[in-house]
Image: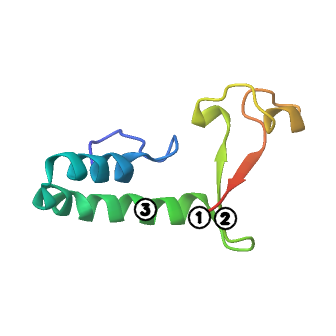
Amino acid sequence: MTTGSEPRRYSCWISDAVWATHLVQSDAEFAKGLLAGMKGNYEGWEREHFTPEVGLFWQSGHDDGMEFNVNSRQSQDIVRGRRGIGRR
């Protein structure tokens, strides 16, 4: 991972992109070569964004490209708002 990168600042589409690339190019070795990094990113999501009590991940709508959203309307902070919970 690149120093200063923030792979969990936004929802993660990396695994979907790797799978789509594999389907088009049929290059399993390419996908397998990225697996360790993808696992590490997922483990980071579990550490930083998972709420065990409800079994769901959370994300700020602002940090997911929805500057003003339903979560921001539920708090005084209309930019960041509250955490939104999504399925695992």
- Secondary element type, mark 3: helix
Residue under the point 20% across and 46% down: 24
Q: Mark 2 points at which residue?
A: 56
Q: Is residue 75 visible to the viewer in this orientation of the structure?
A: no
Q: Mark 1 points at which residue?
A: 88
Query: To which quarter of the image does residue 5 belong?
Result: top left
Sequence order check: which comes first, mark 3 or mark 2? 3
**Residue sitting nearer the eye, 2 or 29:** 29
Measuring from the top left, give residue 66's x and y in whole percent.
65, 29
Residue 19 in sight in this render: yes
Q: Which of marks 3 and 1 is in front?
A: 1
User: Residues under labels 3 and 2: Cα distance?
Assistant: 13 Å
Q: Mark 3 points at which residue?
A: 42
Position in image of residue 57 (x %, y %): 63, 59
Depicted 27 relative to depicted 82: above or below: below
First of labels 3, 1 by sequence position? 3
Number of residues whose C-alpha sits closer than 10 Å to that of mark 1, classed few (under 14), some (14–19) or many (20 or more): few
Q: How is the image coloured?
A: rainbow
Where residue 86 appears, as percent x and y from the top left, is 67, 55
Number of marks drawn = 3
Q: Earlier in the sequence, mark 1 or mark 2?
A: 2
Task: Say few, some or many: other residues with alpha carbon within 10 Å of mark 3 (under 14 / 14 to 19 / 20 or more).
Answer: some
